[in-house]
Image (cartoon, helix red, strand yellow):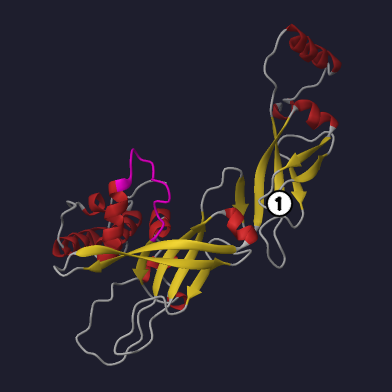
Amino acid sequence: MQFKDYYATLGLARSASADEIKRAYRKLARKYHPDVSKEPDAEARFKEVSEAYEVLHDAEKRAAYDQVGQRWQGGQPPPDWNAGYEFSGAAPQEFAGAADFSDFFEALFGRQGATGRYAHARPHAHAERGQDHHAKLLIDLRDAYRGGTQDLTLRAAVPGPDGRMQWQERQLSVAIPKGIGPGQQLRLSGQGGPGLAGAPAGDLYLEVAFRPDRLFQLEGRDVVFELPIAPWEAALGTTVQVPTPSGRVELRVPPQSAPGRRLRLKGLGLPGSPPGDLYAQLTLVLPPGGGATQQQAWRELARAHDGFNPRASLEA
């Protein structure tokens, strides 16, 4: 995933003050607003400027973004770069109409991040329920298959005695429901911001995201993986042991199976009602070149299929 340099988007130094950020945004927003701008890429630039301002003018988001930027090396994100940041924000039903921000923004701040605002201390002391908070919860695909409990460390940016933002950590134990999917939310009652004057605390909403898996790709509630087979297995058919997120199973590969064919293992996708399916997508793997014996076997195979044209579909 590409790192977004929000400071460069607004033409600012990383030490820019809040007033400088606001002035830069207003100037560029006027320049690129689609209703008035004559620039050919005005709409795209306006979105970039709006996203940069959404992050840099918010103390919580800016602190998290700056920390991520310090760890980003050579264009590659550090492991779990977007995990563990906690932000104040509204409950999910209030997120309708949030701006259409980039994948980078959503990966760091979550889908509800566009509406989050830092809750500064209020001078009055009447009872008031605490703010809801939100964070991203990264899990493995296998966690969604079996469910269970996961320990989570959250870092929140809070103002210190000198007014500067500092990091505050806390640990939580989170129950992972079996079959949960990416984008779904877990609500932890009373784990949000503290209430005022004895009022109850807000809630914490955890937006679930999956870490990349070495073998499996998620397509909705279906799971797909590549199954390498030898040329003779594709031609003659075979039965092989294949991995699934919940253990190994046997799979029959029919004769004359072409590369790219998907074989379905019904009900072995993401658990649910109904569950998804698991698909093995066949890929052809050639054996090593070998010696004279192997080369002679390939020549005999070619003679046995004299007249076969694998590129017939390319001819007019």
Range shown magenta: 71-84
The x and y percentages for residue 33 are: 28, 62
Q: Residue at x 72, y 34 (%)?
A: 259
Location of residue 124 (image quadrant): bottom left
- Front residue of 297/6: it is 297
Q: Residue at x 51, y 70 (%)?
A: 186
Location of residue 34 (image quadrant): bottom left
Q: Is residue 72 magenta?
A: yes
Which residue position is annotated with label 1?
278
Camera sees residue 36: no
Q: Residue at x 27, y 54 (%)?
A: 66
- The residue furthest top is 292
Q: Is residue 53 above or below residue 11?
A: below
* Crowding near the residue tagged with mark 1, few <14, some 14–19, many ≥20 C-alpha atoms within 10 Å: many
Q: Tell me the kind of residue under disc 1.
A: Leu
The x and y percentages for residue 222 are: 66, 55
> In terms of secondary structure, where does tag 1 sit?
strand
The x and y percentages for residue 6 are: 27, 53
Q: Is residue 62 magenta?
A: no
Q: Is residue 12 left or right of residue 170?
A: left
Q: Is residue 303 above or below residue 222?
A: above
Camera sees residue 302: yes
